[in-house]
Image (cartoon, grey):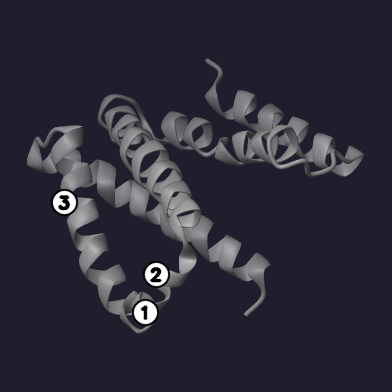
Amino acid sequence: MKPQLFALLTAMAWGIGGYFEKQGLHLGHLSPQMGITIRTAVAVVILGIVSFPDWKSIPAAGPGALLSLAVGGGIVAGSVGMLCFYAALKGAPLGQVMPIAFTSPLFSVLMAVLVGGEPVTAKGILGMLMTVGGIVLLTIG
């Protein structure tokens, strides 16, 4: 399957999932912290099963790769980002939260350019400006 199709499926899963996450928080009168804990527990079970054949590759990955995953995925995105996302879901309409929350590619591109040394292209800049413009349109007044 092409990476672009996986990206589209990601967007669909996160968008549809966000609806149910917000619904669960409100129906259950749950705190954002409890919501993210339930979400993470379910994900750990599913991902543990799916990734089981690859567990043997962990020692060969090396400490740098594991630290990057732990800090970037576990702390920054998986904990701080998700706690903030759930607090936003609990407190604001989905139509305002989702467009703002999913400006994350802008920050990824910024990191890739500033830290990773990826080139800046006119097409990339135009895409980012269009993304920001769309978010402004969806979230103003």
Q: Is residue 17 above or below residue 26?
A: below
Residue 56 disc label = 1
Q: Is residue 20 above or below residue 28?
A: below
At 43% from the left and 60% from the top, the residue drawn is 13
Q: Is residue 31 above or below residue 54?
A: above
Q: Secondary structure at mark 1?
A: helix
Tell me the amino acid under the disc marked 3.
Ile
Q: Callout 3: 10 Å neighbours few (<14), some, many (20+)? A: few
Which of labels 3 and 1 is toward the front? 1
At 17% from the left and 46% from the top, the residue drawn is 37
Residue 87 or 93: which is nearer the viewer?
87
Tell me the amino acid under the disc marked 2.
Pro
Asked whether the residues under the numbered discs 3 and 1 touch, taking CB atoms below 8 Å apart as contact, a structural biologist would say: no
Residue 141 position within the rendered picture, expressed as x and y whole percent measured from the top left? 52, 15
Q: Callout 2: 10 Å neighbours few (<14), some, many (20+)? A: few
> In the image, is 1 to the left or to the right of 10?
right
Asked whether the residues under the numbered discs 1 and 2 touch, taking CB atoms below 8 Å apart as contact, a structural biologist would say: yes
Provide the residue designation for mark 3. 38
Residue 59 disc label = 2
Residue 27 disc label = none
> In the image, is 15 to the left or to the right of 32?
right
